[in-house]
Image (cartoon, rainbow, N blue to C red):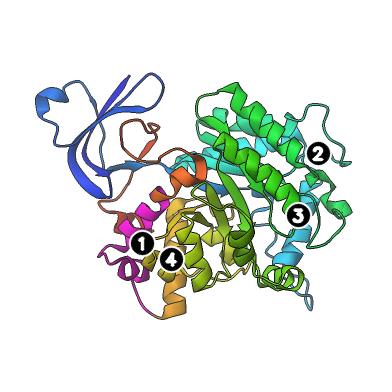
Amino acid sequence: MVRLFTPRAWIDGAWADDVLLVSDAGGRWSEVTANCPPDQRAGAEAIDGPVVPALVNAHSHAFQRAIAGLTERSPVGEQDDFWSWRDRMYRVALSVTPADLERIATQLYRELAVSGYGHVCEFHYVHNDVDGRPYADPLAMPMALVRAARAAGIGLTLLPTLYMRSGFGAPGLRDDQRRFASTPASVLHIAGQVNALRLPGIDAGLALHSLRAVDEGAMREAVQAANRAGWPIHIHVAEQQREVDDCLAHHGKRPIEWLLDRMPVDAHWNLVHATQATADELRGVRDALASIVLCPTTEANLGDGVFDLRTWLQLGGRWSIGSDSHVGRDWREELRLLEYSQRLVHRQRNVAARAAGRESTGEVLFDGAVGGAVAACGTPCALQAGAPARWQVLGAPSLDEAIFSA
């Protein structure tokens, strides 16, 4: 048992004073008491500074940490966009071994923990060996990530990713995608095996790479199994305009439109990016109770576009943040860029606060990142009894100052 006392803590979307925090032997909060009198907090460790929950990083490709900062040069006269970046990223994906992945992920997860993340959702699709053959042990790569998370002291939701084809209507994968090849049975097996380990702070769900990479029948098979197990479901969707155009050409519908029409989207679903979503699609996502995962530093780095946060907040939609390709690894940077991109689009200030009908932009952004945690990993990220005892000292008197005074 650990007993902590802080003069100020962020509880249920507001600051509370004189807070006693007690965790149990299983690493969860057993008591969170505001306005705690001196006699009840005697002997507790005093924390110097405001305490807030450690956040969930809802979207990570750990191996991509190895190329962060190394793709910022472009041959003169050649086009450089998401798709050209992807080709360079594939070259790294083709070479990383389980030992490499463990080293990269351990460094990354430690960086994330230091910055104030307490849990990471790992969207994992490098399944096979460098020749594209399944490893003799299908958990070779997943367990490298599990060991990395445990070494870094961060929670992990592993999301084995279904990846079957190179594009809409394609017969299979390209040769440079051979390590991603998987089936519903293979990814469900990995998730089931990781969950069967029952390691503290470690669990698994399901990821579908994208509509372009998974056909409808396989998607439905995997989703039905995940729903029976109660797992979170993640999918890249509507990140790039080309993806939208290709989906329209193949299905006659936009990606999110198709997903809402053809799949049982509900509160377990996490739509990653949704950069190209329309207002009507966002309304449909909200009505389905699904969550959106935003990755502002990666979306900016790749030139994806700007998510319509103002509409999403006005709708009362749930969302979370992720560092994705890890060009940025600090939640403050993600939230700051999320707000600043809205200001550039709308030519107004404090867009998030105004859309949410509140005064503090920092508080709106932080609460949003907190609120999507249950959808992302099935576990709340909050200072409340029963939640994982993962916390951070803010390092500033307010959330506005913490996010916007870097």
Which corner quadrant holds the C terminus? bottom left
> Percent from the top left, x then y, of residue 236?
63, 56
Residue bearing mark 3: 215
Of residues 165 and 58, the one nearer the viewer is 165
Question: Percent position (x, y) of residue 396?
Answer: 29, 50
- Start and end of the magenta stretch? 348-370
Please tell me which of labels 3 and 2 falls first in the chain.
Answer: 2
**Mark-to-mark CA distance, 1 and 4:** 22 Å
| Mark 4 or mark 2: whose residue is earlier in sequence | 2
* Mark 3 or mark 1, whichever is nearer to me: 3
Disc 2 target residue: 128
Q: Which residue is mark 1?
A: 404
* Mark closest to the chain's N terminus, 1 or 4: 4
Q: Residue at x 17, y 25 (%)?
A: 41
Residue toward you, 108 or 299? 299
Q: Position of residue 235 (x, y in %)?
A: 62, 53
The residue carrying pointer 2 sits among few (fewer than 14), some (14 to 19) or many (20 or more) residues within 10 Å by Cα, namely many
Residue at the spot 28% in from the left edge and 50% down from the top edge: 13
Q: Which mark is residue 312?
A: 4
Q: Amino acid at mark 1?
A: Phe
Q: Residue at x 60, y 64 (%)?
A: 256
* Mark sitting earlier along the chain (4/3): 3
Residue 105 is inside the magenta segment: no
Quarter assignment of residue 245: bottom right
Mark 3: give few (<14), some (14-19) or many (20+) Cα within 10 Å.
Answer: some
Q: Identify which amino acid the numbered label 4 is placed on.
A: Trp
